[in-house]
Amino acid sequence: MTESAKPLRRGWTTGACATAATKAALIGLWGGSIPEKVTITLPKGETPTFDLAETALGPGWAEAAIVKDAGDDPDVTHRAMIRVRVAASAGGVTFAAGHGVGTVTKPGLPIGVGEPAINPVPRAMMDEVVAEVASDYGKTPDIAITVSVDNGAELALKTWNPRLGIVGGLSILGTTGIVRPFSCAAWIASIHRGIDVARAEGLTHVSGCTGATSEKVVQSLYGLPDGAMLDMGDFVGGLVKYLRRHPVDRLTIGGGIGKIAKLAQGAVDLHSGRSQVDFDLWADWLSDPWVATANTALEVYEKLGQPFATEVATRALVALEKMLGDSGIRADVVVIDRKGTILARAGV
């Protein structure tokens, strides 16, 4: 098998790491010694084993830390140190945000305002290991769990958390415990949470853009707040599908001429590895055989100029409205060049 043909390696979510660290710390708290390795059961039954990177014991508390391994996924939290401190408490299991873990400040997320940004599934996983280890040692499952992430506040600036109103650090995430490399699931989930927060804040006009330049242009064009700017990237299909079920009044899609040309063709994933500009189709649409020989949409624009940009915007709007169906969402499309100049608009 060649290097490029090797299967991509899976990794573990921050939630799985925090759960494993919780179990190890509890064993230390109630058993007097923290193990070097610990095994947990994930929601779908898998039983990964984690190495402990750091441990500490004190009067009435124990702490364990695990270095997150995201496998071959380009995850900003890859190699982050996930720390959990457990301490005897009263009244069941409680959760707190340590350094590097954020606090929720806006409605619309699965965790309430004022709560540490530890999502429901990781909380449930930690609840389960508390019950499991308490049973093993004959203890009452009353535990305060504090989760921290080294450099989490800095890492969070590379995520959606500031825009979602999660301040002070990262979220502890994961629904399966497993990071599947390049599955795109985490990105699409972030888009969904962005829509939830925008709706909860009463925003009626949101935008999905393919990159930072188009986002800046669209935000300035309409004076939209940060919370209205959904980090769509290539996932127009994931954005629109969720909006159909959770509609707002208006949606603006912005992007470069190449990606919007693919949207015009009906593509729901605009990544270059998963969709291509169909120059034969565009040659037919434009009644210009030369277009079939082109290499890029930019090349076509440079030769044909404004008429091509207008055709791209107009056809992209038609495709977008078809995707939106009977949702009642009004749509428009903004096509830009790499310098941020607006080339064409449709639907305004």
Image: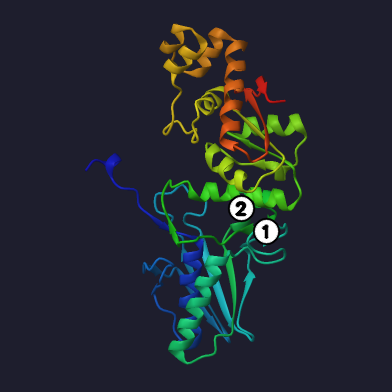
Rendered position, 118 above or below 278? below
**Residue 12 locus on image (x, y percent):** 43, 60
Picture residue at 70% right of the left edge, 54% below the top: 165
**Residue 11 locus on image (x, y percent):** 41, 57
- CA separation in Å, label 2 and label 1: 8 Å
The mark found on residue 156 in the picture is 2
Picture residue at 68% right of the left edge, 32% below the top: 216
Residue type (three-letter) at the residue carrying disc 1? Gly
**Residue 311 locus on image (x, y percent):** 58, 17
Q: Quadrant of the N terminus?
A: top left
The residue beneath circle 1 is 168
Between 272 and 332, the one nearer to me in the picture: 332
User: Is residue 103 left or right of 285 when viewed as pictured?
Assistant: right
Q: Quadrant of the C terminus?
A: top right
**Residue 264 locus on image (x, y percent):** 54, 25
Residue type (three-letter) at the residue carrying disc 2? Ala
